[in-house]
Image: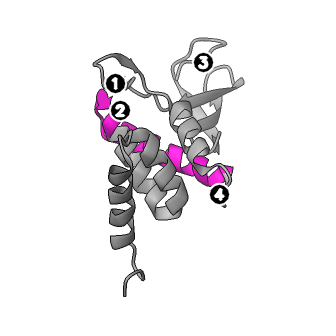
Amino acid sequence: MICPFCGYEETKVLDTRDTDENTTVRRRRVCLSCDRRFTTYEKVEHVPVMVVKNGGKRELFSREKILTGILRACDKTEVSVKEAEKIAEDIEVEIYNSMTKEITSRQIGELVMEKLKDINDIAYVRFASVYRRFQDVSSFIDELEALIRNKPGINE
């Protein structure tokens, strides 16, 4: 690290702390030449991820869009905003950890449904009904029956 005061290339780290929910590292440094102190911040740089929509249109990945859909599905359920934010964060981490530059909106929808299925059936069904665009009642009933079949403790 180059000293911002004298330009000397060697510094010593005095203190290191995580900030912003462990997404940024703050380092307190001292220059080994002029003895002046300064602070640096390190943040992970994410490669932009593009979402490929159903019509082929591409747009930048947005965690906020996922959160909005989850919150809408969880409206008037016992799912807290904090739980919804955790789901959106988990999905975002999963997408960035996959190191892919493009993901389809279908894949994102499946990830959201997988997470919602584990925490609240009503939120899952609401999200699935919008995401899968059920064309008739029978396709909606098929989805409900699949949910019931896969739930432990039901039909035993």
Q: Which residue appears at 56% of the width and 50% of the height? A: 86
Q: Assign a secondary structure to mark 4.
A: loop
Magenta stretch encompasses residue 91:
yes
Q: Which residue is more in the foreground, 85 or 7?
A: 85
Q: Quadrant of the C terminus?
A: bottom left
Residue position marked by numbered label 2 in the rendering: 105
Q: Please tell me the numbered disc located at residue 77.
A: 4
Magenta stretch encompasses residue 102:
yes
Circles 2 and 1 in contact, beta carbons < 8 Å? yes
Question: Which residue of the protein is positioned furthest toward the top in this rendering?
Answer: 6
Mark 2 and mark 3 lie on one chain; the one further toward the N terminus is 3
Mark 3 and mark 4 lie on one chain; the one further toward the N terminus is 3
| Mark toward the viewer: 4 or 1 | 4
Q: Please tell me the numbered disc located at residue 85.
A: none
Residue position marked by numbered label 3 in the rendering: 3
Alpha carbon separation for disc pair 3 and 1:
46 Å
Alpha carbon separation for disc pair 3 and 4:
54 Å
Secondary structure mostly seen in the magenta stretch: helix
> Residue type at mark 1?
Lys
How packed mark 2 is, by other alpha carbons closer than 10 Å (few <14, some 14-19, many 20 or more), is some
Q: Is residue 135 above or below residue 9?
A: below
Q: Please tell me the numbered disc located at residue 53.
A: 1
Q: Is residue 6 above or below residue 34?
A: above
| Mark toward the viewer: 3 or 4 | 4
Circles 3 and 1 in contact, beta carbons < 8 Å? no
Please say whether residue 143 is visible from this viewpoint.
yes
Mark 3 and mark 1 lie on one chain; the one further toward the N terminus is 3
Please say whether residue 16 is visible from this viewpoint.
no
